[in-house]
Amino acid sequence: MVVFSRRTFLLHFYLGNYKIFKIKDQMKEYTLLAILSVIGVFLLGEKVKTGIFKRKLFWLFLSVIVFFKLLVNGYLTGTNIVIYNPKFFMGIRFGSIPLEDFLFGFSMVSLTIVLWENFKKK
C-alpha cells in the first residue's frame, strides 16, 4: 500500500522538484520523507534546546542502535522478508539495507530522546 501517491501536493511542492528526488522522472517519496524526518528532528531538538546532538553519550548510544539495526534489518532485507519497491527509494544500500532506513531509524530514536529530554525538564 502506498501512503503517498505521486500527486501528493506536499511532496511535489518545491522539494519534490529537485533532481535528487527524481530518477527517470519518478519521485522518490521514501527518500524525501526520510530526509525531511531527519531535518525535522534536528530542528525540533534545537527548538526545545535539549542539546542531545552535542552529547558524546547520544552518539555512542546511536552507534549501538546502528549495530543492532545492521543485524536485524540486515537479516530481514537480506532474506527478502522485507522487500522495498525501487520506485520509491534511491537504491543506495549498506549491505542489504536501504539508506532511507537508517535515516528513518535515526529520526525515530532521536525524536524519542528529544521528547523524553524535553518532558523531563518540565
Image: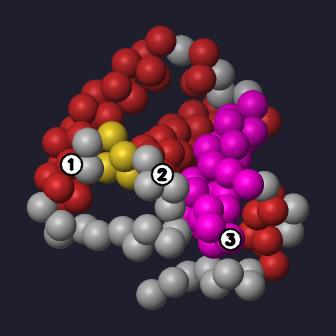
Element assignment for label 3: loop
**x 31%, y 49%: residue:** 97
Prevailing secondary structure class for the magenta stretch in the rendered image: helix
Q: Residues within 10 Å of mark 2 (few under 14, many from 20)?
A: many
Q: Is residue 116 visible?
A: no
Q: CA distance from mark 2 to mark 3?
A: 19 Å
Side of 121 where 18 appears, left or right: right
Nearer to us of marks 3 and 1 is 3
Amino acid at the residue labelled 1: Gly
On-image quarter of the N terminus: bottom left
Question: Which kind of residue does numbered mark 3 sit on?
Answer: Asp
Q: Residues within 10 Å of mark 3 (few under 14, many from 20)?
A: few
Circle 1 — which element?
Answer: helix
Q: Position of residue 119 (x, y in %)?
A: 61, 42
Residue type, numbered disc 2:
Glu
Q: Residues within 10 Å of mark 1 (few under 14, many from 20)?
A: some
Q: Are marks 2 and 3 in contact (CB under 8 Å)?
A: no
Q: Which residue is mark 2?
A: 100
Q: Which residue, given by chain and number where applicable, does mark 3 sit on?
A: 25
Taking the spot 60% from the left edge, 16% from the top edge, the residue there is 54
Magenta stretch? 19-46
Q: Is residue 23 above or below residue 94?
A: below
Label at residue 74: 1
Q: Nearer the viewer, residue 95 or 81?
A: 95
Sequence-wise, the earlier of marks 2 and 3 is 3
Q: Quadrant of the C terminus?
A: top right
- Cα separation, mark 1 vs mark 2, equals 13 Å
